[in-house]
């Protein structure tokens, strides 16, 4: 027997781009909604994930606790799989930061302008403070950038290694 360590010529099996897209979607949902919860806690924003998901439909004491925020962050991570799949289906071949930024901005507009009437605990768009607009807008821009750049990069890397 030799005391030399074996060389690692074996490569890990490649995950599909779709699998990585799902991982990116969940991780980005948890990351950015977690930061949104912190922004809510420090009063940079009037809304949090728990405001949308729980306080709009249940007026109980637990919806104002940290447990509600943690559960909402996890649920947003799961819901983020949908937006990651949408990006994968329609924009994965786009390179650069602009497609992701635009994706994040459109997602922000859809949630805060179009879907707000579905969430009674959230004030109408024009009733939200400018701090909330800027904070949530920036978080969604960064979310879109994270999703977009990560998925496009994985798609490009996967196709280059396949050739």
Image (cartoon, rainbow, N blue to C red):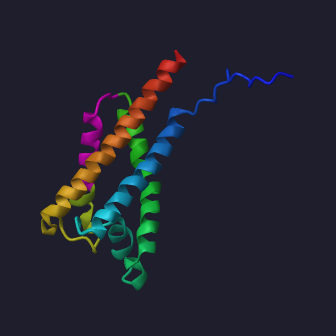
Magenta span main SS: helix
Q: Tell me the quadrant of the picture where the N terminus can be found.
A: top right
Looking at the picture, tell me which residue is in the foreground, 152 or 139: 139
Q: Residue furthest bottom?
A: 61
Q: Residue furthest top?
A: 163
Q: Is residue 130 magenta?
A: no
* 86 relative to 112 in the view: left or right: right
Up the image or down, 97 lies above or below 54; here it is above
Q: Quadrant of residue 7?
A: top right
Question: Which range is magenta?
Answer: 94-110
Image position, residue 34 (x, y; %)? 38, 60
Q: For the point 40% across and 36% down, which residue is it?
A: 150
* 105 relative to 151 in the view: left or right: left
Q: Is residue 107 magenta?
A: yes
Q: Is residue 1 something that shows in the picture?
A: yes
Q: Residue furthest front?
A: 3
Up the image or down, 34 lies above or below 119; here it is above
Q: Quadrant of residue 36?
A: bottom left
Q: Is residue 114 something that shows in the picture?
A: no
Looking at the picture, tell me which residue is in the foreground, 64 or 85: 64
Image position, residue 8 (x, y; %)? 68, 24
Q: For the point 45% across and 29% down, which residue is it?
A: 155
Give the total number of marks visible in the rendering.
0
Image position, residue 102 (x, y; %)? 24, 41
Q: For the point 40% across and 53% down, which residue is it?
A: 31
Image position, residue 77 (x, y; %)? 45, 55
Looking at the picture, tell me which residue is in the foreground, 8 or 134: 8
* 130 relative to 62 in the view: left or right: left
Q: For the point 43% across and 55% down, which residue is it?
A: 30
């Amino acid at each position: 027997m030799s005391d030399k360590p074996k060389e690692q010529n074996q490569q890990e099996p490649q995950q599909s781009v779709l699998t990585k897209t799902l991982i990116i979607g969940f991780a980005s949902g948890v990351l950015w909604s977690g930061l949104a919860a912190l922004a809510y806690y420090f009063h940079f924003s009037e809304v949090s994930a728990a405001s949308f998901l729980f306080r709009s439909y249940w007026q109980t004491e637990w919806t104002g606790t940290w447990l509600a925020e943690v559960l909402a962050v996890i649920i947003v991570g799961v819901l983020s799989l949908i937006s990651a799949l949408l990006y994968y289906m329609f924009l994965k071949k786009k390179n650069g930061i602009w497609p992701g930024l635009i994706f994040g901005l459109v997602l922000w507009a859809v949630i805060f302008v179009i879907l707000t009437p579905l969430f009674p605990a959230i004030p109408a768009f024009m009733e939200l403070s400018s701090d909330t607009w800027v904070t949530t807008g920036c978080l969604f821009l960064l979310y879109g950038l994270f999703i977009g750049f990560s998925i496009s990069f994985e798609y490009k890397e996967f196709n280059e290694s396949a050739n």
